[in-house]
Image (cartoon, helix red, strand yellow):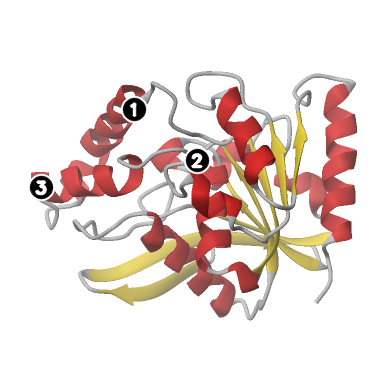
Amino acid sequence: MPIFERAVARGQVKLHYEVAGEGFPLLTIAPGGLRSAIQLWRDRPIEPRAFGGEYKVITMDQRNAGQSWAPISAEDGWQAYASDQLALLDHLGLERCHVMGMCIGGAYALSLAKIAPERVASAVLIQPIGLLANRQVFLEIFAGWRDEIRQQHPEASDRDFEAFFQNMFGGDFMFSATEAEVARLEVPLLVLLGDDQYHPAPISRRVAEVAPHARLIEDWKQEPARTKAQTEIERFLREHSHP
């Protein structure tokens, strides 16, 4: 079980990850909110293992999910997760990669593309989360996650958790990026449409509208659309798999 460790202000971050296949690197970020872990890719319409024949597929448990752990502070937010992801890429000796994220993974992928566009060849956002009269829903999800892990984090006060929530879900649009930031993003994007209160369809559509180099796939969850979407993702990744 590979574990990568790195030091942060309050201690050590321990990241569980897996690597499979060979080829251009593809970093994948699972659904599941703050519980985003490798196992949550299983039995999804689009799965990372489908790309192992052509790409070096990296999967990981995000901090404080699955078998990964990190201290929690009031300064944590999207930047902290992006720092973990970039540190893991450095550890693996990877200069650039594609990023594929589902649900919250789409917001993580967008954050990484915003913070370090030179490291991201392209990003696939699968039913990404976003703000559309649903902040209370994310507050409730956060509260459940906080209660699950609280005993593992004596270093974190109530104020730390409150600040962390605001840093993650207090913003607008994609939470990890504003509409204006998405409009300035030069990284190519492929967006698979969301269709519920966690993954609002208008957010997916708007990302595809305002990003300079974006495409939208509307139908992708059921066959035969699923196979067609898989083929489109493969075509998109190949198009941008260059040094």
Residue at 78% over, 26% down? 220
Dot 2 amino acid type = Ile
Separation (CA) of disc 3 from disc 2: 23 Å
Residue 129, image x and y in percent? 51, 34
Dot 1 amino acid type = Arg
Q: Secondary structure at mark 3?
A: helix
Q: In the picture provided, is 232 more to the left or to the right than 47?
A: right
Label whose residue precedes the other's in the sequence (3 or 2): 2
**Badge 1: few (under 14), some or many (20 or more) residues near its Cα, within 10 Å?**
some
Pick the front one: 119 or 183: 183
Pick the front one: 14 or 183: 183
The residue beneath circle 1 is 135
Separation (CA) of disc 2 from disc 1: 14 Å
The residue beneath circle 2 is 104
Q: Secondary structure at mark 2?
A: helix
Is residue 53 at all visible to an observer of this figure? no
Residue at 10% over, 44% down? 158
Dot 3 amino acid type = Arg
Quarter holding the C terminus is bottom right
Pick the front one: 68 or 108: 108
Label whose residue precedes the other's in the sequence (2 or 1): 2
Residue 202, image x and y in percent? 58, 25
Residue at 57% over, 44% down? 106
